[in-house]
Image (cartoon, rainbow, N blue to C red):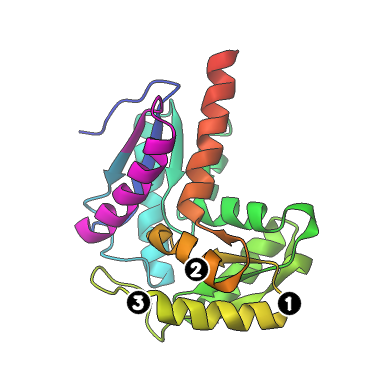
Amino acid sequence: MGTHLVHSEILVINPTSSPAIGHKVGAGVDDIGRKNPSARIIVETMTAGPAGIKTQQDIDDAARLVLDRVRRHPDGIAVVACFADPGVAAVRGHFPAARILGCGEQAIREASRGGRRYGILSLSPGAAVRHRLMARILGVEACYLGSVPLSDNPMDASWHPGIAPLLQSAASLKTMGAAAIVIGCAGMGAFRDPLARAIGLPVIDPLESAVTQALRIGNATTAM
């Protein structure tokens, strides 16, 4: 049975069934919670979901679960902890009043603010097509310089790259003219600060970006 939310609570949805991915998302949320001790943030893993988000079928399967989760308990604020944002558009289509944020879209909004040019550290070469489409939908395609993959394979539950491949790919994006770097995964926030120090550019963790925005929305709602 899902957790019932009140309006000021934030539900962070891990759209995969992977406990390892859920753990990484939970660790990222814990870091945010320590900076916002009054926040009520719940992480929920979709146990019927795909093991990872690797293919369009995985995205579609996860989207149905996210939609069903929000349908059952539409109150509160939801964050989908996956850069592909599965289910976000579907929820908005079915429930226009729903307050739901996707990590991917929120990170792109933050990266491109003020016309800033940005690039994405991608988990696979094929993700670049989706990243460009996301930028186009958000109206910031002119700011998007490209995506540089970290690996030929998307991250699964056990894959952990270390900072070296991130730094190499971030350096390529900096050479391309990026003024900000987006980590194209919701479970790699631990790399943000060391990568930013090493590369000398702002680095955006999509999970932190989306949850921070959800906190702003929640605070504004509570103040009304």
Sort mark 3 into few (<14), some (14-19) or many (20+) by Cα contacts within 10 Å: few
Q: Is residue 140 magenta?
A: no
As drawn, the label of residue 161 is 3
Q: Are marks 1 and 2 in contact (CB under 8 Å)?
A: no
Amino acid of disc 2: Leu
Amino acid of disc 1: Gly
Q: Is residue 25 above or below residue 197?
A: above
Q: What's drawn in magenta, residue-wise?
A: 19-42
Q: Are marks 3 and 2 in contact (CB under 8 Å)?
A: no
Rendering coords of residue 19 (x, y %): 20, 56
Horizontal side of 193 relative to 16 (left or right) equals: right
Q: Is residue 116 above or below residue 145?
A: above
Q: Which residue is mark 1?
A: 177
Rendering coords of residue 218 (x, y %): 52, 26
Furthest residue toward bottom: 152
**Earlier along the polypeptide chain: callout 3 or callout 1?**
3
Q: Is residue 6 above or below residue 92?
A: above
**Nearest the eye: 34 or 29:** 34
Image point 40% across, 27% down: which residue? Answer: 9
Q: Is residue 34 magenta?
A: yes
As drawn, the label of residue 195 is 2
The Cα–Cα distance between marks 3 and 2, rounded to whole angstroms, is: 13 Å
Label 1 vs label 2, nearer the camera? 2
Label 3 vs label 2, nearer the camera? 2
